[in-house]
Amino acid sequence: MKKIEQTYGYDDVAIVPGEITLNPELVETQIKIGNIDLDIPVLASAMDSVVDTNYAKHLSNLGGVGVINLDGLHVRYENTDEIYQEIIKAPKEKATEVLQKVYSAPMKENLIGEIVSKIKSNNSKCFASFVPASTKKFAPVAVEAGCDAIVIQSTVTTARHNSKSLKGLILSELVESLKVPIIVGNTVTYNVSRELMETGIEGILVGVGPGSACTSREVLGIGVPQISATMACSTARDDYFKLTGRYVSIITDGGIRTGSELCKSFVAGADAVMIGSPFSKTYESPAKGNHWGMATPHSSLPRGTRIVNKQEYSTKELLFGPSSRTDGTRNLIGALRVCMGMIGAEKIINMHDAKLIYAPTIKTEGKIYQLSGQGS
């Protein structure tokens, strides 16, 4: 008989306060992915609704990095303004159909170098994303143009993938030829993470289906809650590091909306997080609050939907505040700093030593006035 394993998401767990505490100004939020330093451990998702060249530069200036999708609109159209407007103005019942149409245009290889050059024009960091099928052909073009890191991303990625290609994508060969950090995703298990690490990559994206615009869990029934997934993959990282002395970053990708979820990701073992929907709501977002995932335009089996959000805040307010909102959706780095202080973690890596407990009542215990709408 099959056994069903208990797994945990963000609302199931709580962080236990530390025995030593620090002032928030004493903690450090800097991280390193391969040889690349980031001031804050935050990546913006490789979605056209989240990152264009301007947004990539803006987030880099704030200390993070926006991953540009080089399988998307920007390598299919020289002028994407009209395309964004067509998507934004599409009625709800036609949105997926419109997305399928605009993403069916062929990719233009000459645009890859232009996009990378635009991002690098003011010394911004450039991370570029490709699906596995296009990586061998187009990733070298991006690297030659100055791209700092390559992200190879699909709903589920493994080191052992069978296809009709005479020679599929061999990650170890790609690592050797490109000479820049390579991040691969997405996965949710220990074994796959270990096998991916052994190819020489520098980072792993963790998460299948938790994003607000993704419907893979509904369409395919596939996914693992983010806390359990992050813990499994980070355990693989720790075991691999003990064996080889080489550290591979774990990046929790999807489902993060609040400061508490961001902090829980790091205590579960993440070194960085990738966020989509919250960035799509910023004033600077290219799709003006609209949001859709990479799998939404799939020609025959779309696994996502267009979400229509309001543009509610600046990227700076989202990350650093100030804010008068009490729901945890603003000042994410401020929340991170306070949490690090409360658990005595001077650096992000020290957060891995903090304790998580199963606490499904953590959001409701003693909150009767908040839940009844009587709070102020």
Image: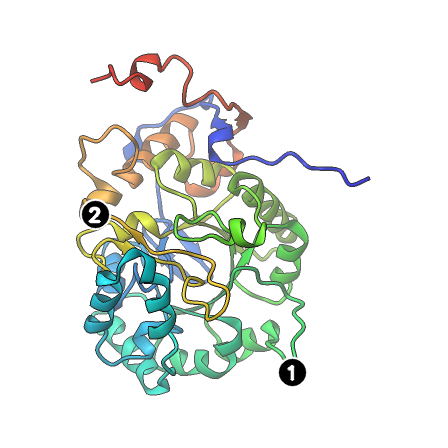
x and y percentages locating residue 172 in the rendered image? 61, 73
Left or right: where 237 falls relative to 283? right
Residue at 34%, 80% in the rendered image = 112
Viewport quadrant of the N terminus:
top right
Among the 4 quarters of the image, the one containing residue 328: top left
Identify the residue at the far front of this view.
93
Question: Which is closer to the viewer, label 2 or label 1?
Answer: 2
Residue at 53%, 34% in the rendered image = 353
**Residue flagged by tag 2: what amino acid is it?**
Lys
Left or right: where 281 falls relative to 241? left
**How many discs mark residues in the rendered view?**
2
Badge 1 marks a residue whose secondary structure is: loop
Depth order, front residue of 359/34: 359
Left or right: where 68 falls relative to 348? left
**Residue flagged by tag 1: what amino acid is it?**
Lys
Tell me which numbered mark, 2 or 1, is placed earlier along the sequence: 1
Among the 4 quarters of the image, the one containing residue 320: top left
Q: Is residue 139 above or below residue 330?
A: below
Q: Is residue 336 above or below residue 217?
A: above
Residue 207 appears in the picture as rendered: no
- Image disc number at residue 310: 2
Left or right: where 244 falls relative to 302? right
Badge 2 marks a residue whose secondary structure is: loop
Depth order, front residue of 247/50: 50
Q: Is residue 357 above or below residue 349?
A: above
Question: Could you give the CA–CA distance between mark 2 and mark 1, rounded to whole angstroms?
Answer: 45 Å
Viewport quadrant of the C terminus:
top left
x and y percentages locating residue 47 in the rendered image? 36, 62
**What residue is shown with label 1?**
167
Residue at 46%, 68% in the rendered image = 298
x and y percentages locating residue 216 in the rendered image? 51, 54
Say few, some or many: other residues with alpha carbon within 10 Å of mark 1 (under 14 / 14 to 19 / 20 or more): few
